[in-house]
Image (cartoon, rainbow, N blue to C red):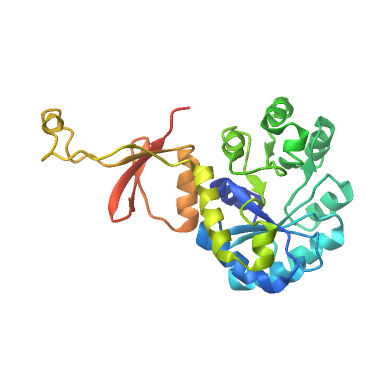
């Protein structure tokens, strides 16, 4: 069983955990492969269907290093079933003291849902420092998260509910957001049709929405641009910015992409060339 600190570091590095509602456990392995191919080796398999335990087990057997959790955990029995089948932690839509206490007593990492200050204070009293803000958009979105987070400096949040590629970056830009949960990269119709190619493509778009990589400077060609020679600017690396350099470093480490630290930036090989990536101005 992974520790909560290890789970939190992986979740922070990914920035986004796909929330999965799966009806047929036979789809679990190809779905997990599609998510991994798209750059998100993680899944929250919700206990909204009877297939959830077998789906978790299939993903864990096929991909031992994948970050897999169980969502919509409502009872101690479901928490036990989730862990027995390979979930590294559990997530609940609300804060049920019975479920949280059971998990803590059995060393099962749990992130319960909270939507009010009272919820958060109960979580703190139980010894927790990470909660799920749910349903995020219905409860006021990132503005509500910032407002509710203000008195609770020790708490980090995993907003879920209504998160999409358009609003994801606004959540992740807030320093108290650990990561977000979202299902937009796994549309119900695509999963029902077994269109894993589409799911991989949408997952890649989701990864870009997390990291916001943007090209800001191309290398200069000394043979065509004499001014660049005069200014000593030849041979410059292509330069990209990212929304969070620390998150990107964690993501590269988690997914096995090698990089080299430079001053306030990193260099990485991509497409047969070396590029420089630095923190975007906020």
Q: Visible in this render: residue 72?
A: yes
Q: Quadrant of residue 229?
A: top left
For the N terminus, give its image quadrant: bottom right
Which residue is more in the foreground, 274 or 80?
274
**How many numbered discs, if any?**
0
Q: Is residue 143 above or below residue 266?
A: above
Residue 65 is at least partly visible in this image: no
Along the viewing direction, whichever of 232 and 85 lies nearer the viewer: 232
Residue 215 found in image quarter: top left
**Above-or-below relation of 28 to 275:** below
The x and y percentages for residue 253 are 46, 53
From this view, report whether residue 123 is shown above or below residue 270. Answer: above
Q: Residue visible at 45% across and 52% down?
A: 252
Residue 34 is left or right of residue 146, and the answer is left
Looking at the picture, does residue 253 appear above or below residue 176? below
Q: Position of residue 88 (x, y in %)?
A: 68, 60
Q: Position of residue 207 (x, y in %)?
A: 52, 49
Of 208 and 54, the residue lying toward us? 208
Residue sitting at the far right:
98
Residue beneath the point at 79% across and 58% down: 106
Taking the image as shown, residue 126 lies to the left or right of residue 66, namely right
Q: Position of residue 246 (x, y in %)?
A: 48, 41
Query: Is 70 on the left-hand or right-hand side of 224?
Result: right
């Amino acid at each position: 069983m992974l520790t909560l600190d290890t789970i939190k570091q992986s979740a922070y590095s990914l920035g986004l955990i796909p929330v999965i509602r799966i009806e047929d456990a036979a789809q679990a392995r190809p779905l997990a492969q599609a998510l991994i191919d798209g750059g998100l080796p993680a899944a929250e398999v919700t206990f909204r269907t009877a297939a959830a335990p077998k789906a978790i087990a299939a993903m864990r057997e096929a991909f031992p290093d994948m970050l897999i959790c169980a969502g919509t955990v409502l009872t101690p029995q479901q928490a036990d079933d989730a862990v027995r089948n390979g979930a590294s932690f559990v997530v609940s839509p609300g804060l049920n003291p019975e479920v949280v206490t059971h998990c803590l007593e059995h060393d099962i990492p749990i992130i319960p849902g909270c939507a009010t200050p009272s919820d958060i204070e109960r979580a703190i009293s139980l010894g927790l420092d990470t909660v799920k803000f749910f349903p995020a958009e219905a409860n006021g979105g990132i503005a509500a998260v910032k407002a509710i987070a203000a008195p609770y400096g020790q708490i980090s949040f995993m907003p879920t509910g209504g998160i999409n590629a358009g609003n994801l970056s606004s959540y992740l830009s807030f320093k108290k957001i650990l990561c977000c949960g979202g299902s937009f990269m796994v549309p119900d119709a695509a999963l029902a049709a077994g269109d894993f190619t589409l799911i991989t493509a949408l997952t890649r778009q989701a990864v870009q929405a997390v990291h916001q990589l943007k090209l800001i400077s191309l290398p200069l060609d000394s043979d065509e641009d004499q001014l660049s020679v005069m200014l000593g600017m030849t041979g410059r690396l292509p330069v990209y910015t990212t929304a969070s350099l620390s998150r990107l470093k964690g993501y590269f480490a988690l997914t096995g992409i090698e990089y080299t630290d430079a001053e306030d930036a990193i260099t990485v090989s991509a497409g047969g060339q070396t590029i420089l990536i630095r923190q975007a101005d906020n």
